[in-house]
Amino acid sequence: MTLAFIVAGGLDQLTGGYLFDRHVVDGLGALGRSVRVLELPGRFPAPDAVAREAAAAALAGLEDGAAAVIDGLALPAFEGCLTAEVARRHRFVGFIHHPLALETGLPLAMREALALAEARLLPRLSGVLCPSRTTAWHMAEYGVARILVTPPGTAKPAVRPEPRRNGPLHLLSVATISARKGHLLLIDALAELSDRQWWLTCIGSLTRDREAVLALEKAIARHELGERVLLAGEWPPERLGAAYAEADVFALPSYHEGYGMALAEALAHGLPIVATTAGAIPETVPADAAMLVPPGDREALARALAMVLDHTPLRLTLAAAAAKAGAALPDWPQAVRGWVDALNRLIAAD
């Protein structure tokens, strides 16, 4: 029987979650599994009428006993149609990258609505796949009985470049420009280090959260960092390897991460990391490979950046630990096989 794989919007979106989704869909096909991708139109994560109607139509098109994977971003659209009775007739598995209610900067009413939707829907599923123990813990809080952790893979480089020992240092951040990713805090921290030699490239969407982008652009202008900070926009996955290879330090002061795929890629490329202790970051990034500071602490972030910029031996030590940790991470074929095995276990246990 064909597996339905349900996502919010197009599967080709350039975020970590959608990249994981695409690898899974491609991997399922390569393993001979028949997959039908259902791309729901409408607004997400707070669903509008179009999204809700599309979700209802997707469920109505399933045969009794069919299995379906619902990406977590699409899940709230099913609140009116994924009843306990419907759940009993099918095998639904949630693919939850992180709880939607933990997104940074949401209005209180939206946060509460998303939390309520997740609390109602998640226990109705046959089980949940998530990328980290941290996200699994949040799923258990929601009352989910069957939870399996399936981390994503990394695109391991063939050769890691030697760390730079002198000259201006290239900082890299890879993430959609949004409040949760902490770009604004990064700029405010780097403004305190304008006497050092550095430049920063931020790769990630400039359209998904226009309010965050405008705030970031204003901060860059206010601190007169326009010639040192490049907002590069989205890059396709095949270009990102070159960006990691050219960087000296990876910086991402997120307020929450359900895993941190860009951080894992930085490890795979042997980059020293400056990040936070938020969410699953300490689970993904070993302490000896990074300077991890409390989320939202600008002064601590500035001190960590200064230490990495100023002290070559520290930077080299962090880079060596990052390369060691990155070598132990699964590649994408390994990760997808683990994901498919976990999916089969959840479906069989229903």
Image (cartoon, helix red, strand yellow):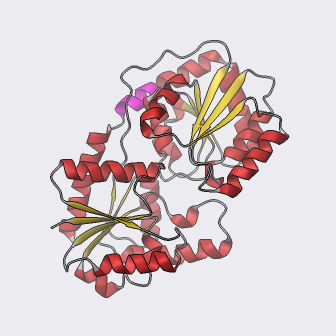
Q: Residue furthest top?
A: 166
Coordinates of residue 257 in the picture (x, y in percent)? 53, 51
Is 19 or 124 nearer to us in this picture?
19
Work out whether residue 50 or residue 333 is closer to the camera in this orientation and state it. 50
| Residue at point 23%, 53% (across, down) | 28
Q: Is residue 119 visible?
A: no
Residue extending farthest to the bottom is: 85
Q: Give the image quarter of residue 65.
A: bottom left
Magenta part of the chain: 323-328
User: Does the segment drawn in magenta span residue 327?
Assistant: yes
Q: Quadrant of the C terminus?
A: bottom left
Front position in the image: 66 or 124: 66
Estimate the x, y position of residue 196 in percent, counting from the top left.
76, 22
Residue drawn at (59%, 56%), measured in percent from left and top?
Answer: 208
Q: Residue 63 placed where, x, y %?
A: 20, 78
156 is higher (above) or lower (below) than 14: above
Magenta segment's dominant SS is helix
Whether residue 133 appears in magenta in the rendering, the answer is no
Quarter that holds the N terminus: bottom left
Q: Residue at x 49, y 15 (%)?
A: 162
